[in-house]
Amino acid sequence: MASKKIIAICQSGGEFVTNNEDGSLTYVGGEAYALDLDNQTLLNDFKQEVAENIECGTDGMTIKYFLPGNKKTLITISKDKDLKRMINFFKDSEQVEVFIIAEEGVALSTPNVTASRSSRTNVSEPEHTPVIPMDMIHPDDLFQAPVEISPPGVYPSSNDEKHRKAAMQWENAITGVGQRFNSFSEFREALHKYSIAHGFTYKYKKNESRRVTAKCKSEGCAWSIYASKLPTTELICIKTMNPKHTCDGAAVKAGYRSTRGWMGNIIKEKLKVAPNYKPKDIANDIEREYGIQLNYSQARRAKEKAREQLQGSYREAYSQLPLLCEKIKETNPGSVAIVYAKDDSSFHRLFISFHASIAGFRQGCRPLLFLDSTLLYAKYQGTLLAAVGVDGNDGVFPLAFAVVDEETNDNWHWFLSELKSTVLTCPITFVCDFQRGIRESLHEIFNEECHHGYCLRYLAEKLNNDLQGQFSHEARRLMIQDLYTAACAPTLESFERCAENIRAISPDAYDWVTRSEPDHWANALFGGARYGHLTSNFGQPFYDWVMEVNELPITQMVDVLRGKIMELIYTRRVEASQWATRLTPLMEEKLQSETSKAGSLHVLPSHGSTFEVRGESVDVVDIDQWDCSCKGWQLNGMPCCHAIAVFECIGRSPYDYCSRYFTTESYHVTYVESINPIPNLENPASAEVDAAVIITPPPSKRPPGRPKMKKVDAFDIVKRQMQCSKCKGLGHNKKTCGKVNKFEESDPLLLTGLETEDLEGVE
């Protein structure tokens, strides 16, 4: 493979078009160049060669490609490893298609136009003014000429003539009597653009199915327009128009007719390029380019409308959920996909687990699951619940997720019930929060077949909140640090030493720790196997995926997550096919690290399978029981340095004493199954939707305030509190100190400027 070359067909300057039948992408237009690639090619060299052909810079260049057999998901090449991975994917092919996307400013040009039914008639123009009817301009060209699109938040100088308002493009959207349109909606849109370009507002006097009459909104102004259907046709024609204004247009410019739908049309093209386009930047761009002022709420609603135009109706997505579940089970046999509605047909909850994830978890993953939730910020809100496993290389392995109308004890109980019927593996160790009914549901559903490890991050947050009014910021930070040390302590003696450190800071904090059920979070007392993972945010990479798509309609969000899991499984399967070690790379590294420590240890045989190992401490190893008094072997599933010293002494291999979940063989089994694509999901035929099953969106409202987008680390929650310089109390300053102010009011001597210490002994 090192000597074999493949041909990279580099395409640029075109665009991706979505196939309505199966959702696949096709690259249309542009130019193509052929370059040679092999395993020795570096990404920077490849970019440089591409840049020389298409005459662009390498800094703003993005390179993407499709996985074999998958034309719906684009993979980005961002480092040398990604390029080598692509070459390995196509090692059995002679060529690979790559797509070059330049993120630099686009040079502007006059759009190519073609004739249409809406061509102007009976209107004369000044010779020096070339007029292009709006109906002859492609919508995409509205954002290319004569305005150069800048990234959100970056605005060119207003003195540069190149950056005239985009609204000037619409001065001739309405040309006069005789102009024809395909529909009234097309006429209304042209009228809307025309009014913005000329700086006036209008109102409808007639707005019917066969005729539309509008006049300037200013009282007494003569401007008016009338359009109606041409006889025996569906075309709309302007019959009369008075183009002269007798009012001050600037005085009414603030009263523009701007609707969410129209503004959505304006910003949706930019939203394609910048999905995270902020409402603040939208408002600034619209004012700069069109002279229209929007407040934040208007810009946010316009963004929602644009998203809906691009991605489909949020409401209709809920009605497609039954079809989505059927498609998942049809294309991925063995998967679990089920949706429930309430009695009023509103959405209640959705559970998804793919067969590849179920089989991979059962056959190759540790019996360890992390439970957590994240809020969704789409139009109808909701919460995503997830169960994430860990593979043999300590990688995140998504097992199942659910979307529920709200996070409640009942929904958690339902999710765990579905999870048990899906996994069928016991016993399992769960790492999750200890509140919200999870603890009771785990005990009720799994009985004694599971171990519940409290998430240390949630535990530290509760400790901080409970003690916030009693201790300073430094003291609470030290207590949380000691809490983490106590949780990681492998033996009972070391745990008790950490607890004593907390007692030295505060007996109340020590009592809090002893009442917090340490047998659910301390390594020295916990009965399950957590393999060193103490917090439920281990699955953060999966939640990062959710954050990228949590504003999509629910069906699209589920499908994007499916695509990401599908890509994850495929990529890891291909990577693992190159491994030559008995253990996975990360576990091999850990074993070698412990082996290097074993060289300085001295082994003394005791009896049978028991050995004494001397180093900085004296430890006892029982190789038959896979046990060491340091507890490292039991906690991590990997032989500690003491055990490895024994194996070297008696001539045994430490690989035989590693957990089977860490082997490359188990890793292969984890990713042996694949997730299959789901065709016809984005635009299902109306006949496919079961009319008997109608699901409407949940009656949810957007919560107040700015969404909390990221969970903070336990040490970041310890914020410095205000401390009074007089009484040394917490939570206030000397101006609001009740004790000092009360004393000052009762003693007029303080008005002379005497301090509290000066009043001692004064009667």
Image (spheres, rainbow, N blue to C red):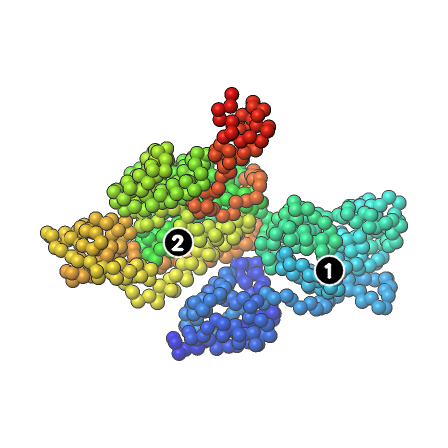
What residue appears at the point 24 percent right and 49 percent down from the top-left corner?
A: 631
For the question of whether residue 47 can be seen, the reply is: yes
Q: Residue 388 in the image: x percent, y percent?
A: 39, 49
Q: Which residue lies furthest to the bottom in this view?
A: 3
Q: Which residue is drawn at 53% across and 38% down?
A: 345
Q: Which residue carries the number 1 mark?
A: 158
Please report the residue visible at 44 percent of the width from the left and 55 percent of the height from the top.
Answer: 565
Q: Which of 357 and 294 is in front in this view?
A: 294
Residue highlighted by disc 2: 396
**Please, what secondary structure does the residue beneath circle 1 have?**
loop
Could one spot residue 116 in this view of the protein? no
Query: Mark 2 Cα within 10 Å, few/some/many (few <14, many 20+)?
Result: some
Given the image, on which type of amino acid does mark 1 rest? Ser
Q: How crowded is mark 1: few (under 14 residues within 10 Å), some or many (20 or more)?
A: few
Q: Where is residue 84 in the image (x, y as percent from the top left)?
A: 43, 70
Q: Is residue 692 left or right of residue 245?
A: left
Residue 469 at what x, y percent from top left? 46, 34
Q: Which of 336 and 724 is in front in this view?
A: 724
Image position of 646 (left or right of 29): left
